[in-house]
Image: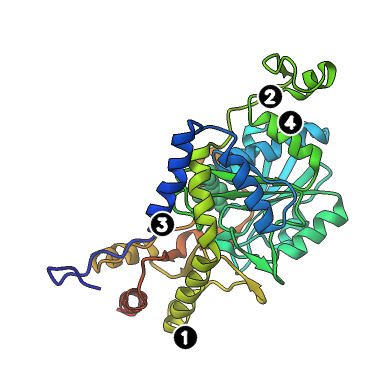
Amino acid sequence: MTDSTGQRPPIQLFVPKFRTDETLEEIRETLERGWTGMGFKTVEIEKAWSDYTGLPHSHFLNSNTSGLHLAFDVLKSRHGWVDGDEIITTPLTFVSTNHAILYTGLTPVFADIDDMLCLDPESVLERITDRTRAVIFVGIGGNVGQYDRIRDICRERGLKLILDAAHMAGTRVEGRHVGHDADVTVFSFQAVKNLPTGDSGMICFADAEDDAKARRLSWLGISSDTYARTTGAGSYKWRYEVEELGYKYNGNSVMAAMALVALKYLDEDNARRREICDLYDRYLEGQPGIVRVPMAPGTEPSRHLYQVLIEDRDETILKLNARGVAPGVHYRDNSAYSLYQPYAGNTPRAAEASEKLLSLPLHMSLTDDDVAYVAEQLIAVVSG
Ligand SMILES: Cc1ncc(COP(=O)(O)O)c(C=O)c1O
């Protein structure tokens, strides 16, 4: 597509699509009612999300990062984990995944990735020690990878399983939304995710008591339940109890209003994402020097990302920028960051991917012609 000067505007990596009028109408309700905080629309989105995913407990938060912190915090305190206990994780993720382990005084142990860029079960098995308490699985780009095998390992070894589903809103396996067999699943509804708001997320615990604790902790540890139990429901509600040191991680009604509208279009948008990815696949298949990242077979991935591996990635990005294409990189091997160097392990595939990965533009405003243009430019740069 060209603009009025005949120029093709740069094709961006991510451009969120908001149904503006519908979203403003939903937000208007919160303003007119005078209720923009927690409650009202946050209750509605929690119900809508549970209905959509089939997950029994959904708690709306201000981000996925907060949710990951809560996930470790709740599991640590409810299961008697102590500082320094080990969590097996991937080095190829956004740092939120691993920061959450450190926030909680736990130790990240990096396992390597497979060709789908997700945790490799064999590498996970090699990392298990008597201090291992859990595995956190990241479904990069909406990919399920070898999640089932990791889940089975966790069950056999008595480990908890946390699913960082930041990219997985709408990913299904055999018709079922992901998350139903994890101890806790955390989604991101950040501004450029498949279900975009400004910033928000959802935490979904399998266990009702874990969920109840997460709800208290996301609201500064405030519990009216204890007081209600002793005084009878409804009386002296202002005299709530604070039993534990919580955080201010709750979501609000303005973000929830945005999420309620975006949720209506999630399946439609993800279907278009898959169509775009199929087009990229068709153009790039068999092209020398371009390795496509496979999706787990037989699944319906949300396709948050379309990733390829190429040599000279950094140079290629600059050349693509000059041709009006703005790709991205997801992600740098976390163990290369100075904060994580003390935890660096033997993860050669993640280190290699970190140097070669490139994410191509993928969003709702791309035309088929844009996709063809991006693929053409990539092929030209890589073969040139
Ligand atoms: C894999 C992964 N985990 C966690 C997060 C954090 O999500 P949020 O921005 O909602 O905190 C992101 C966001 O980019 C992510 O990509």
Which residue occupies the foreground of this view, 321 or 78?
78
Residue occupied by mark 3? 19
The mark nearer the N terminus, 2 or 3, is 3
Judge depth for marks 1 and 2 and give the one in front: 2
Judge depth for marks 4 and 2 and give the one in front: 2
Residue 293 is left or right of residue 51, and the answer is left
Which disc, if any, is residue 221?
2
Q: Secondary structure at mark 2?
A: loop
Q: Secondary structure at mark 1?
A: loop
Q: Secondary structure at mark 3?
A: loop
Residue occupied by mark 1? 286
Which residue occupies the foreground of this view, 357 or 243?
243
The mark nearer the N terminus, 1 or 3, is 3
Q: Amino acid at mark 4?
A: Asp
Residue occupied by mark 4? 83
Identify the image's colour scheme: rainbow, by chain, secondary structure or one colour: rainbow
Q: Secondary structure at mark 4?
A: loop
Q: Amino acid at mark 3?
A: Arg
Occupied quadrant, residue 167: bottom right
Badge 2: residue crowd in 10 Å (few <14, some 14–19, many ≥20): some
The mark nearer the N terminus, 1 or 2, is 2
Q: Is ligand 1 within 8 Å of the beta carbon of the residue shown at mark 4? A: no
Q: CA distance from mark 1 to mark 3?
A: 38 Å
